[in-house]
Amino acid sequence: MINSDKIVIIGGGHNGLVCAAYLAKAGRNVTVLEAADQVGGAAATREFAPGFRASVAHLLYLLDKDISKDLALDSHGLKMAKSGLKTIALAESGDHITISTRRLSGANLSTEDKAAYREYRRFMRKFAGVISGLHNKIPPRITSERSDMIALGKMALKVRMLGRNDMRELLRIGAINIYDVLQENFDNPLLKGALSLDAVLGTNSGPRSNNSVFTALHRTSGNTRGAAGQLSLPNGGVGAVTQAMAAAAREYGAETHTGSPVDKILMDGDTIRGVQLSGGEQIAASVVISNADPKTTMMNLLGAQHLEAGVARKFHNIRASGNAAKLHLALDKLPDFKGVSPTQLGHRLVIASDMEYVERAFNHSKYGEFSTHPVAEITIPSIHDETLAPDGKHVLSAIVQYAPRNLGTGWSEGKAAFTDAVLETLSAYAPGIRENVIATELLTPEDIENEFRMAGGHWHHGELSLDQFLMLRPVPGSAQYETPVEGLYLCGAGCHPGGGVMGSAGRNAATVVLAQ
Ligand SMILES: Cc1cc2nc3c(=O)[nH]c(=O)nc-3n(C[C@H](O)[C@H](O)[C@H](O)COP(=O)(O)OP(=O)(O)OC[C@H]3O[C@@H](n4cnc5c(N)ncnc54)[C@H](O)[C@@H]3O)c2cc1C
C-alpha cells in the first residue's frame, strides 16, 4: 500500500496550497486534502447571508511578491479591487485622522506629530526590513554546525547593518512595548490609539504587553506588490488569492480534494505510512505535510504516543488562545459614519480612540470576559467589489477585539451580547447603522476553531511572540518545518514566519522537502 512517491498535504489553507504548488512545479506527486468544502482556510471567501460574501482574513498586506510572481497568481485570476488603502482613525465627534504610509491629515494634528510620523514610519519600516529579510529563510538550528553558525551570523549582521544608532534603538524598543514607543513619539491620543491597534490585531495582547513592538513590526514586514505595509482588497475577497493559488497548484499537477478531513496520520513503527480520512479511507504516502496548526497536528492527528514526552510537552504547551472575532454585516445601504466622506468610506476604518481605550478593551479578556467597548478594524469591500453583495447592498467586514477563546460564560451565551456590544460601539460612529442591517454573522474564536480547525481560533496558529519566533517556532527543535517524525513536516502559520496571508511558511516547507 505504500506509494513512495506520494506527498499528502493535510489542509488547503493558503500555506498548504503554496507548498503544493511549489512541490508540484518541481515535479512531485502532490495531493492536498482539505476538510472544508472549499480551499482557502481562513483566507476563503464564503457566503454568510444569501448573496453576501466575505472572508475571515479581509485585507492583504503580507502576501510575498515573489510567491505571487513564481505562481503567476495574476494570470490565475488574482486582481486587486483596491490597493493602497489608507487608515481612517475614527473619532466619535467625526474629527477623524487619515493615516497613509507617507503622511497624516485631519483635525487636531500638530506639526510635531506630522514630522514624528515620518520618522516613525522610517524606523519601523527599516526595522521591519530585518524581519521581512527572514521570511523566506529556513531558521537555523542552534547547533555548532558550520552552516547554522553562518546563518545565525548573517542574521546578526543584518541587525548590525542597521547602523549603530538604529541598531541601539531597535534593541531598546524591542524590549519595551508599543504603548511606551508611541507615547515617546506622539501627542495626539487618537493617532496613538490607531497606531497601537496595528500592534495588537490578532494577538493576545494589549498596547502595554511585551512583544507588542515585535507584532507591530511583523505587520509592517510585508512586501505585497513591492510596498511595505500596503493594504489591498482583492477582487472577490481574500478568497480570490487562495483560488488563484489552488489553480496554480492544479496547473502544475497537484490534486486538490475538498470535503476530505484527515482523521489521523498513519505510522508503521517510526515510518510515515500516509493518512486516514474521517470516513475511514486510507491514503498512502511517504511524506505528509500538515497545514493544520502544529499543536493539533502533533497531539491529535499524530498522537503523543509517537513522540518523546519532552517533545510532546513542548507541542502541547504552544500558546494559541485566539482573542479576535470577526463580524460580517449584510447592509441594505452604505452606513453613514460621522465625518467620513463617501471616498473615505472605502478605506480601512479603525475604532481605537486612544491607547487607554485599547488597553481597557484588552483588560476584560484577561478575566475571561469580552470587551464591552471593543476595538475594531473595519472594511466595506463591496464599495470596490460588486461581486460581494447584491446590487445596491453592502458588506461590512470587521475584526473585533477582544473576544477570548475561553469566555467565562461560554460563547453560546456570550455571542449575542458581544454582537450587541459591537453594534452599540459601531452606532456611536455610524448612528442608525443597526437599521441598515439585514443579516449578521459573528465568528468568535470558538467558531473559527471549529470551522477552520485552527487551535484556539488563533490568527497565527500559535501566539506570535519572541518566545515562539524564528528558531523557536513552533517549538525549539522543530523550527525547520521538519518534525521529530521522519517524513512528517509542517507548513502552516504556526511555523516561521507566522500568520497573515503571506505564503512564506508554505514555500519554505516546500524548499525543505525538496532538499531531502
Ligand atoms: C479573525 C481573523 C482575522 C484575520 N484577518 C487577517 C487579515 O485581514 N489579513 C491577513 O493577512 N491575515 C488575517 N488573518 C490571519 C490569516 O487568516 C491566517 O494567518 C492564515 O489564514 C493562516 O493560513 P494557513 O494556510 O497557515 O492556515 P489556515 O488558513 O488555518 O488553513 C488551514 C487549512 O487546513 C485545513 N485543515 C485543518 N485540519 C485539517 C484536517 N485534519 N484535515 C483536512 N484539512 C484540515 C483547514 O480546514 C484549513 O483550510 C486573520 C485571522 C483571523 C482569525
Image (cartoon, grey):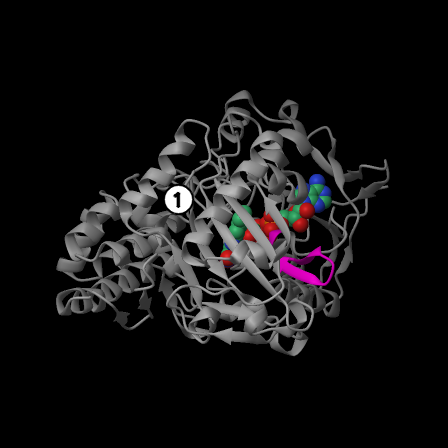
Q: Where is residue 498 shown, x and y percent of the image?
A: 47, 49
Is the residue 298 above or below the residue 497 in the image? Answer: above
Residue 385 lies in what quarter of the image?
Answer: bottom right
> Could you tell whether 147 is left or right of 5 in the image?
left
* Residue where numbered disc 1 is placed: 145
Is the residue 156 above or below the residue 306 in the image? Answer: below
Q: Where is residue 80 shown, x and y percent of the image?
A: 56, 75
> Could you tell whether 252 is left or right of 357 in the image?
right
Bin the neighbour count of mark 1 within 10 Å (Cα to Cα): few under 14, some 14-19, many 20 and up: few
Relative depth, front residue between 509 and 463: 463
Q: Which residues are magenta?
A: 42-54
Q: Main secondary structure of the magenta part?
A: strand
> Could you tell whether 396 is left or right of 249 in the image?
left
**Is there any visible trace of residue 484 in the rendered image?**
no
Residue at the bottom extreme, as displayed: 75
**Residue under the image location 63 percent in, 64 percent down:** 332
Three-letter code, disc 1 = Glu
Relative depth, front residue between 284 and 205: 205
SS of the residue at dot 1? loop
**Residue under the image location 34 percent in, 45 percent down:** 358
Residue 44 among those drawn in magenta: yes
Q: Where is residue 331 shown, x and y percent of the image?
A: 61, 61
**Dividing the image into 4 quarters, which one contains the N terminus?**
top right
